[in-house]
Image (spheres, rainbow, N blue to C red):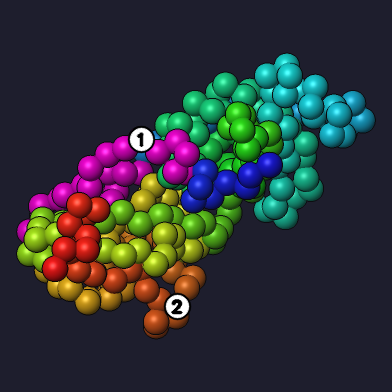
Amino acid sequence: ATILRGAFARSFLPARPPTVVRCPDRFISVASDVAARPSLAGEPRCPDTEGGSKQCRRLRQRGWVPGIIYGGGHREQLVKVDSKELMRQIRARPVSFENCVFDLLVGDQTHKVVPRQAQLHPVTDEVLSVNFLRFTEGTAVSIPFRYVNEEASAALKRGSYVLQVTNYLKVAAMDDRIPAELEVDLTGVKPKDVIRLDRVNVPENLKVLDTDPNFVIGTVVGVRVSGKNRGRG
């Protein structure tokens, strides 16, 4: 089984051109990216009859995905969620599924959770299992970067590009308004510039957990060389 993170997101991510945002201010708000909290419906899973690997295999055959709700100072709870609905939620947020807060409805209880440890079948991409961490103030999430304002850089317009070093920023979320992506402003970047956190718009409700002063997102490098031009001199 494949544990999902970057590869998981890329497997469902539709192709799209780079996003260009023109704004008089250097940083732009990401509040519009924060949607209303989505929900998932689940059912309790009996430890005696639905807890083992064979029983979980039968659940998948009947259209369920097994999982566990954990954390938040409460005991673990075995659950199962509808596989089609789960896949719909994954496809709706391919880069942010594991940093999105859901209302998970189980019986007469509603759990505020963040998906964790989603696993895919290596061939069919079937979701084999997914766990749910109870969301509390300060829950750690990893949010992917998205570049904006590429057209405001003469170097990037001439063909330079960002060689990405780090794909995610680990933060502590103080509330459930977690953006799908963190925007990295590329206004005015030049070749050999190092892209660091000072170019990232981090909302006030997120606390950056990686405080390394040498944290690097990427580096601006020279013009890409196409296959037909490579070797000419």
> Would residue 143 appear left or right of 157 to someone viewing this image?
right
Q: Position of residue 169 (x, y in %)?
A: 43, 63
Give percent across and percent down for residue 31.
29, 48
Q: Residue at x 33, y 60 (%)?
A: 203
User: In the shown orientation, is residue 15 left or right of residue 43?
Assistant: left
Q: Quadrant of the N terminus?
A: top right
Start-end of magenta stretch: 9-34
Marks 1 and 2, how far apart in space?
Answer: 32 Å
Q: Is residue 195 rendered magenta in the image?
A: no
| Residue toward you, 85 or 42 | 85
- Dot label at residue 14: 1
Report if residue 111 is visible in the image. no
Would you name the residue on which mark 2 appears? Answer: 211
Q: Amino acid at mark 2?
A: Thr
Give the structural element (helix, strand or loop) at label 2. Answer: loop
Which amino acid does the dot numbered 1 rest on? Pro
Q: Which residue is situated farthest in the top direction here?
A: 62
Q: Residue at x 45, y 36 (%)?
A: 12
Residue at the location (76% across, 23% down)? Answer: 59
